[in-house]
Amino acid sequence: MKKVSFLVIAAAVAAMFVGCASVQVADKAQFNDMEGDAIAHVNSQNWGLYFLNVPMFTGSSNEIGSISCFNEDSVNVGAATKVLTAKAKELGAKEVTDVQSQRSSIMLPFPFPFLFYIKEVNVSGNAVR
């Protein structure tokens, strides 16, 4: 029982120091020689730790790969879409089609329920000429 409690507490402490934003690209070379105007398929992800609705540690949508502490509420569809379209524009796309998004929020039951949440957002689309 002590080991399980220790693992739960260790996971909670580790979760308090993480948050991540990333962009992944599958370029046309990975499309198996299919025809079309698509340049790439772009996927933008972000997640972070929240206290109630206040962001504690989130991935920064302004600086991909860095963590934002207590000041950037970037785990939402709007911020992830902004990252997606910026990457598509960087690749030379004129538009992004077939945009899809997914959001989730998981309540952490420790140390007290309904206080801490891990939120995640995922937006993807096709960058087109």
Image (cartoon, rainbow, N blue to C red):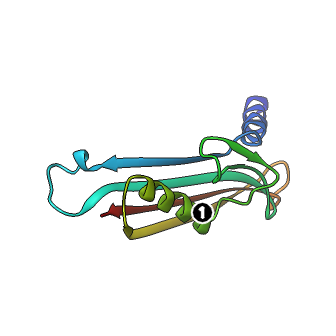
Image quarter in which the N terminus is found: top right
Residue most toward the top? 3
Image quarter in which the C terminus is found: bottom left
The residue drawn where x is 57% and y is 65% is 103
Residue 33 image position (x, y, % from top left)? 14, 50
Residue 103 as seen in the image, left or right of residue 51: left
Question: Of residues 128 and 113, which is closer to you in this image?
Answer: 128
The residue drawn where x is 38% and y is 68% is 95
When asked about the image quadrant of residue 127, the answer is bottom left
Residue 90 as seen in the image, left or right of residue 41: right
Q: Which residue is mark 1?
A: 104
The residue drawn where x is 60% and y is 68% is 78
Residue 26 image position (x, y, % from top left)? 33, 48
Residue 42 as seen in the image, left or right of residue 15: left
Residue 104 image position (x, y, % from top left)? 59, 63
Question: Of residues 108 and 73, which is closer to you in this image?
Answer: 73
- Tally of marks: 1
- Kind of residue at disc 1: Ser
Q: Secondary structure at mark 1?
A: strand
Look at the picture and state if 100 lies above or below 4. Answer: below
The residue drawn where x is 67% and y is 45% is 19
Look at the picture and state if 115 lies above or below 69. Answer: below
Question: Of residues 73 and 112, which is closer to you in this image?
Answer: 73
